[in-house]
Image: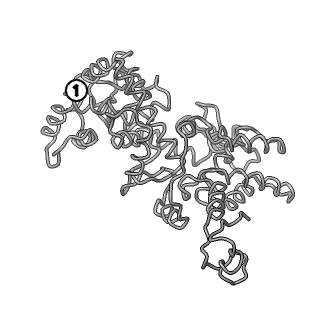
Amino acid sequence: MKEKDIKLTDNNIIEMDINKKEKHECYKCGEEAIFYNTEVEKWICEDCKNIEDELDKLAAKMEKKLSKRVYSFDLKELIECLSKDEIYNIARNLGVAKISGLNKDKLAEKLIEEYKPLIEKRIGLFEEERYKILKSYIDNKGVKNFDDIDEEEADKSAYFIQQGIIYPTVKNDESMFLMPKVVQKIIKDKNDIDYRRVLKGNTELINIYRGMNKAYGILKVEDAVKMLERFNENTDVSLLELLREASYYYNEFREENSYFINNEIDNYEEVLNDIKKEDIKEYAVISKEELLSMNEENWVYNSKAGKSFYKEFTSMFSVDKDMTIAMMDDLALDVQELEPSEAVDKMIELINIDNEEVRFVASKMMNKFVNKIRLWKLKGTSTNDAKANVISEVSSKVVGRNDPCTCGSGKKYKKCCGRNGNVVVLPIK
């Protein structure tokens, strides 16, 4: 690239003359890039650059806000430097009652007064993952540098901030997370066999429901609690509170109008209408092992249906493993909103197969795969299993003596094929 074809912009970004023939892909989205980021030494498109600029502005704004926070492990000092809205949100999230109408000082005073028992109660609803994060603060004397936290933990930290368990601040131009001494003591005191037993039980129950969320998509809250109760060996835990806190932390499902709803569902009323149309009476019975397996990485690929499809598909087509896994994930999600054939057609168009014979073979394999996916509108039953259930129901249907004969003669059954008996079981056709 010649020097006259480029110009330097803000944030170490070089802009390229788009009229030149040289083309580059954005390292974030793959679209055509016209900017070169000298800091990471990669090309970036205009849309992604604008997003990065907005994030930089937001980060600067947050840093300015955090610079007013204290660096302290004293709960009172940490809370009193917050805004009234921030104090109110923590109090509400922890379950402090009668806080409407209180001024900032009274609100802070009430929160501080009720804080310890509420945190102890909340921690009783945690699983091993949340405890591990909190324990890492204890191991680091109650403080963590933001730059030392990986991306996943940084995302999850928002939950602990909203609960008033950790507090962000800035010291010497470095962003920090602090844990009050009172929380540190609670965590240390909880480090015993009894609490670890609670953590283990909570972990299993939460992961079972996370699997149920993927399999069923939407459940009445009362049904979710009843179904989870089958696996509950910890009689002291409130399953409803356990699920509510898990929904806030994992952000995989939400509670709305007495339903727990998978966050992949935008219009849950449409899904409820589909369930009503399908008229499936009972939820599919799914083993604990299968539900737990749905929380593993690449669970669609690792499922029985996924392994079968991957083996068959890659034996016919030369395709990258990661791309195939991504394709399977997309199919498993698309089939929740579309008919199986429509989900397959959409994928065929996306991967751009022109040859008709190849399209037919690929479509056949994909249809076989999506028909094995548990569908939300079928209450966790797959298309294949739903068809098998219909056949089973038909095969066991009893015909009365005065009913029309099943042979199609138009005569009553007792005067036709049923002359030698009272009832007959229909054969499977």
Please state the horizontal and vertical placement of residue 267, each as a whole percent of the image: 48, 60
Quarter of the image with the C terminus in it: bottom right
Residue 57, compared with residue 113, is above or below; it is below
Please state the horizontal and vertical placement of residue 287, each as a whole percent of the image: 55, 41
- So how many labels did they put on this image? 1
Q: Is residue 422 left or right of residue 202?
A: right
Residue 191, compared with residue 245, is above or below; it is above
Inspect this view and state whether residue 229 appears.
Answer: yes
Q: Nearer the viewer, residue 85 or 415?
A: 415
Q: Nearer the viewer, residue 102 or 187?
A: 187
Q: Is residue 264 left or right of residue 408?
A: left
Q: Which picture quadrant has residue 383?
A: bottom right
Q: Which residue is mark 1?
A: 75
Please state the horizontal and vertical placement of residue 303, each as a whole percent of the image: 65, 40
How many neighbours does mark 1 have within 10 angstroms: few (below 14), some (14-19), or many (20 or more)?
some
Residue 220, compared with residue 212, is above or below; it is below
Q: Which picture quadrant has residue 8?
A: top right
Quarter of the image with the N terminus in it: top right
* Direction bottom: furthest residue: 410
Colour scheme employed for the rendering of this structure:
one colour
Inspect this view and state whether residue 5 appears.
Answer: no
Please state the horizontal and vertical placement of residue 375, each as a whole percent of the image: 58, 54
Mark 1, secondary structure of its residue: helix
**Amino acid of disc 1:** Leu
* Direction front: furthest residue: 420
Say which residue appears at 82% left-offset and 54% top-offset. 361
Q: Is residue 223 left or right of residue 428?
A: left
Say which residue appears at 66% left-offset and 57% top-offset. 388
Q: Which picture quadrant has residue 356?
A: bottom right
Say which residue appears at 19% left-offset and 28% top-offset. 76
Q: Is residue 302 left or right of residue 194?
A: right
